[in-house]
Image: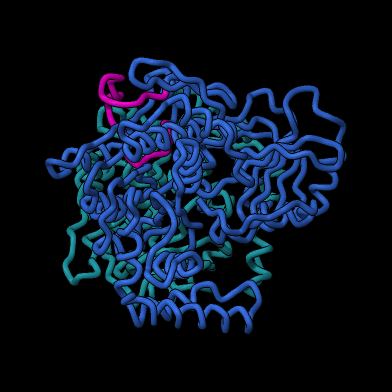
Chain colours: A cyan, B blue
């Protein structure tokens, strides 16, 4: 399938064979569907090697991987260091989850005390937490309440700005969660974070479409799916005695 | 007679445990015996005249074991086998205690044991299996403590104990590589699917790594075709037709595995016709493609246990299926779990249900599946779904997680089989 770049949005997901542990790559699916429901054509390009990279990119998704594949994932991402730098400088929205985020930082610690160098593309680094975290994670982010699941060994420090304050869970390990740097978002909220938090998806889509002079139209389909997300969020909020 | 005191004590423990909790306490006698006589389990298992067969791997162990046992019994062998339990050492010892004489002998020509790869790796060091059967390496993505390398290493450890042969899936690259390292003197029996079978499953068969090339029919048994409940296998140049217990390429691969294992266990006594006939008559496995008659209608149950099995089941569903209910329950703690699967092939789902109904509804919607209704109350969803007019095409199909399966069976008053994990 080819879509004229002028006509729609191009969403890339980087190295989904290495970085899709929890279905994080599915966030590209969420962005594409929401764009389509809002009247914009959208295509997803799976980038397995630099040769797969399309000429113009509107949105970038990077999922999380296993620690076994850390070096392979870092080397793979390293081949895209130049385009990544250009996207970050050019205001292209980038969502990076878990190790996909950590590998863009200065570096990350391992459970055995050693460390792996990151690509140094975003400020900060990931350090080992006292214990692995696997639980719900709720974040208050600029008036948005983000809900999701976290399962990670490392926290994060040194971000330019964080995504928000932790209302439930561990996040970065210091009461904050995630990293924001211009159009970049890094988070421990794994899996389909954009499906469960459609406002975050729309924030990214809004930026990308504005940059292209495109507009997103409300639709019945979006409204119906967001109703489902709200109900799913309510269940978690009630269970955790929070508001959604 | 060296184990007589331990066996007697174990039996006393069993009586006490049952007296305290009727029907329960099955691990306690095993714990007692394993503590005072740690040699009992390996010595008994290694003592069968026809040897010990171990079936292990990530998925398909239960079905393969059942099929293999049926094939061996059809050849006139008396077989000792186990029900899979969480703690295999204690569960096995308890099961052996039921059957063992005070001299430490068990009636039976051969033992066939299904082993979880983790527990299997722990206890295999003391076992001398004649045949080790390896199914595949899949990783439940939710379980971050288990990566594929670790699973493959555990399987290699078990395979190294084989004294006669290692039976392995040539389409699983981890296992194919493992086969190259088996000690001389131990034979490697390979099985695999033909190009057409793999091509009919565009997303593969769920293995972590799939071998780049298919097995040549000269090098082992080959699955040449799957259509609904029918499959064809090529054994020594002859085509055999198999009947599967449930729809799906993975069941056909289980049957192929059992056939290859039966030949490794029976050697010259192996008769492919007898084995194929026996495998074709095993009853459907609960909840996995099982077809039941309930409330005057016919329903197919499809159990999904991980993203790989969801994908395989979505892909192998009859495309004409008109009425589908999907139920996901509290066993899926993190809704991210199933997202690696692409559910778009379902096309149209009438009801999404279970305690995670909204989450699975979200996934279906983003995969472009039309979802008519979300009904968190599974009982109500089932009542309404079964009351719908008969579908014009296909049968009513319920796809559920393990928790929703239990609730569905209870709601419909159907028999349950708790001791049947994958």
Can the viewer see residue B361 in this picture? yes
Residue displayed at 51% across by 82% down: B13
**Nearest the eye: B308 or B302:** B302
Q: Position of residue A61 (x, y in %)?
A: 40, 44
Whether residue B403 sits left or right of residue B59 in the image: it is right
Q: Position of residue A83 (x, y in %)?
A: 26, 39
**Nearest the eye: A30 or B160:** B160
Residue displayed at 18% across by 60% down: A116
User: Which picture quadrant has residue B364?
Assistant: top right
Q: Position of residue B296 (x, y in %)?
A: 86, 37
User: Which picture quadrant has residue A17?
Assistant: top left
**Nearest the eye: B209 or A35:** B209
User: Which picture quadrant has residue A111?
Assistant: bottom left
Is B227 magenta? The answer is: no
Q: Which SS does the magenta portion mostly show? A: loop
Q: Farthest left residue?
A: B184
Whether residue A11 sits left or right of residue B342 in the image: it is left
The quarter in which the C terminus of chain A is drawn is bottom right
Callout count = 0
The magenta segment:
B204-223
Residue displayed at 45% across by 80% down: B8
Can the viewer see residue A209 in this picture? no
Is B215 magenta? The answer is: yes
Q: Is residue A146 above or below residue A243?
A: above
Residue displayed at 14% across by 44% down: B183
Q: Is residue B407 above or below residue B281?
A: below
Q: Position of residue B298 (x, y in %)?
A: 78, 35
């Amino acid at each position: 399938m080819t879509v004229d770049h002028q006509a729609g949005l191009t969403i890339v997901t980087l190295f989904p064979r290495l970085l899709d542990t929890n279905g994080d790559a599915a966030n590209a699916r969420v962005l594409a569907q929401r764009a389509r429901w809002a009247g914009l054509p959208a295509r997803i390009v799976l980038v397995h090697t630099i040769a797969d990279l399309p000429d113009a990119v509107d949105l970038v998704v990077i999922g999380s991987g296993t620690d076994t594949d850390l070096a392979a994932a870092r080397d793979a991402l390293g081949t895209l260091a130049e385009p990544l730098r250009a996207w970050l400088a050019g205001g292209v929205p980038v969502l990076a989850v878990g190790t996909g985020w950590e590998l863009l930082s200065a570096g990350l610690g391992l459970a055995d005390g050693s460390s792996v160098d990151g690509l140094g593309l975003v400020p900060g680094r990931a350090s080992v937490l006292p214990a692995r975290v696997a639980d719900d994670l709720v974040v208050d982010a600029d008036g948005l309440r983000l809900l999701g699941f976290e399962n990670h060994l490392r926290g994060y420090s040194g971000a330019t700005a964080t995504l928000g304050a932790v209302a439930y869970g561990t996040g970065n390990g210091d009461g904050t969660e995630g990293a924001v740097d211009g159009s970049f978002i890094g988070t421990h909220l794994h899996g389909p974070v954009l499906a469960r938090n459609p406002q975050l998806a729309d924030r990214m889509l809004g930026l990308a479409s504005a940059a292209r002079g495109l507009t997103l139209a409300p639709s019945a389909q979006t409204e119906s799916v967001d109703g489902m997300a709200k109900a799913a969020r309510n269940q978690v909020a009630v269970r955790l005695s929070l508001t959604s | 007679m060296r184990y007589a005191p331990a066996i007697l004590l174990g039996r006393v423990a069993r009586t006490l445990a049952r007296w305290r909790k009727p029907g329960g306490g099955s691990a306690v006698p095993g714990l007692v015996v394993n503590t005072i006589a740690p040699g009992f389990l390996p010595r008994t298992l290694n003592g069968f005249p026809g040897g010990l067969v171990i079936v292990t791997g990530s998925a398909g162990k239960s079905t393969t074991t059942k099929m293999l046992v049926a094939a061996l019994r059809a050849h006139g062998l008396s077989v000792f086998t186990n029900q899979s339990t969480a703690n295999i050492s204690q569960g096995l010892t308890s099961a052996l205690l039921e059957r063992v004489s005070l001299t430490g002998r068990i009636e039976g020509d051969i033992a066939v044991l299904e082993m979880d790869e983790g527990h299997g790796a722990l206890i295999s060091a003391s076992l001398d299996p004649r045949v080790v059967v390896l199914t595949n390496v899949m990783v439940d993505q939710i379980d971050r403590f288990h990566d594929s390398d670790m699973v493959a290493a555990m399987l290699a450890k078990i395979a190294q104990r084989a004294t006669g042969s290692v039976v392995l899936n040539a389409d699983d690259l981890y296992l194919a590589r493992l086969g190259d390292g088996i000690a001389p003197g131990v034979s490697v029996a390979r099985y695999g699917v033909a190009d057409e079978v793999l091509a009919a499953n565009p997303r593969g068969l769920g293995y972590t790594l799939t071998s780049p090339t298919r097995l040549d029919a000269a090098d082992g048994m080959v699955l040449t075709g799957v259509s609904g409940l029918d499959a064809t296998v090529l054994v020594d140049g002859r085509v055999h037709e198999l009947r599967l217990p449930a729809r799906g390429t993975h069941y056909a691969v289980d049957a192929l595995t059992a056939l290859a294992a039966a030949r490794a266990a029976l050697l010259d006594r192996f008769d492919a016709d007898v084995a194929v006939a026996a495998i074709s008559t095993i009853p459907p496995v609960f909840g996995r493609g099982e077809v039941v008659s309930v409330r005057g209608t016919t329903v197919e149950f499809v159990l999904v246990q991980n993203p790989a099995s969801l994908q395989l089941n979505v892909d192998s569903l009859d495309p004409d299926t008109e009425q589908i209910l999907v139920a996901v329950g509290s066993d899926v703690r993190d809704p991210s779990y199933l997202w690696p699967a692409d559910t778009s092939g379902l096309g149209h789902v009438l009801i999404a249900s279970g305690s995670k109904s909204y989450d699975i509804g979200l996934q279906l919607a983003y995969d472009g599946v039309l979802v008519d209704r979300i009904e968190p109350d599974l009982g109500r969803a089932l009542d309404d779904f079964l009351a719908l007019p008969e579908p014009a095409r296909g049968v009513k199909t319920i796809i559920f997680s393990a928790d929703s399966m239990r609730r569905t069976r209870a709601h419909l008053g159907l028999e349950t089989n708790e001791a049947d994990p994958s």
